[in-house]
């Protein structure tokens, strides 16, 4: 009888041991499965973050290599008025934007230290001379510069159309300028029709001049 009890106990222990082993294997498989899922999720997250780093932000995707693409809040509105000192080596005079009413204006914000401004200077100068007979006035606004630096820039690039000095940047702020060069195209009624917040190509300039002449 005692032998049968021992055999029964052995079977019970073996059964319990088998159950423990099975539970351990099951637990191990579950842990492996959880680890695998977590690892895959981490890898997926890393891939997503890496792709976000490599993808340009929405406001940069449409930007040119020379500057950002930004909204033009002044489009369709009267151009903000200003009265600034004219850049010349003679007697100091001022120019009031209101004095150009009735004429279309290409208003170019620039700075002497701005490389893209230097690159587009010749294009603006040559085009300004061609547009004189069509009643379109080119006007430069030297942003946060000294008079000496502004005059040196004009002399270096042979600029003959009028330029004024926005020494404290107040006029640029009124126009929402965040980058130089930035050019506004103002029709003969004094209304802003378009804006280019970067260095212009010849095609850019011609396209926007057509808007003024149209």
Image: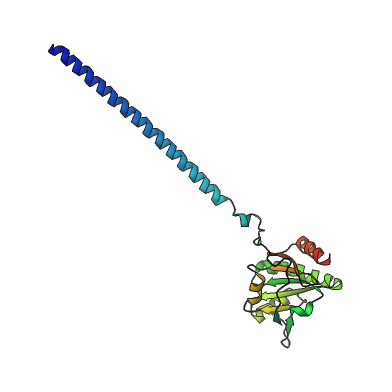
Question: In the image, is residue 11 above or below residue 78?
Answer: above
Q: Position of residue 96 (x, y in %)?
A: 74, 81
Q: Is residue 112 visible?
A: no
Identify which residue, 161 or 44, lies in the foreground: 44
Return the residue found at the far right. 133
Q: Is residue 105 left or right of residue 28?
A: right
As rendered, which of 199 and 152 lies closer to the eye? 199
Residue, far top: 1
* Residue 33 spot, x, y in % from top left: 41, 33
Residue 188 placed where, x, y %? Answer: 81, 72
Note whether residue 22 is visible: yes
User: Looking at the rendering, in which quadrant would you find the C terminus?
Assistant: bottom right
Say whether residue 63 is left or right of residue 76: left
Give percent across and percent down for residue 132.
Answer: 84, 73
Left or right? Give the position of 43 relative to 212: left
Identify the residue at horizontal 76%, vertical 79% (top origin): 98
Position of the N terminus, as image quadrant, is top left
Q: Quadrant of residue 172?
A: bottom right
- At horizontal 73% and vertical 77% (from top left) the residue drawn is 163
């Amino acid at each position: 009888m005692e032998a049968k009890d021992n055999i029964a106990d052995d079977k019970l222990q073996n059964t319990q041991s088998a159950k423990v082993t099975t539970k351990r294997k099951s637990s191990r498989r579950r842990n492996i499965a959880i680890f695998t899922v977590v690892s895959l999720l981490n890898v997926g997250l890393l891939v997503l973050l890496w792709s976000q780093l490599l993808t340009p932000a929405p406001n940069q995707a449409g930007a040119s290599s020379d500057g950002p693409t930004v909204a033009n809040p002044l489009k369709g509105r009267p151009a903000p008025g200003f009265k600034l000192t004219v850049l010349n080596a003679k007697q100091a005079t001022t120019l009031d934007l209101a004095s150009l009413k009735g004429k279309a204006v290409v208003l170019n914000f620039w700075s002497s230290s701005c490389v893209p401004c230097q690159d587009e200077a010749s294009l603006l100068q040559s085009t300004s001379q061609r547009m004189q007979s069509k009643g379109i006035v080119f006007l430069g606004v030297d942003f946060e510069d000294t008079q000496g630096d502004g005059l040196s820039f004009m002399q270096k690039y042979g600029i003959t159309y009028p330029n004024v000095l926005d020494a404290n940047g107040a006029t640029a702020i009124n126009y929402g300028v965040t980058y130089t060069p930035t050019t506004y195209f103002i029709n003969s009624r004094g209304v802003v029709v378009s804006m280019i917040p970067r260095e212009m190509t010849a095609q850019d300039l011609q396209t926007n001049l057509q808007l003024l002449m149209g």
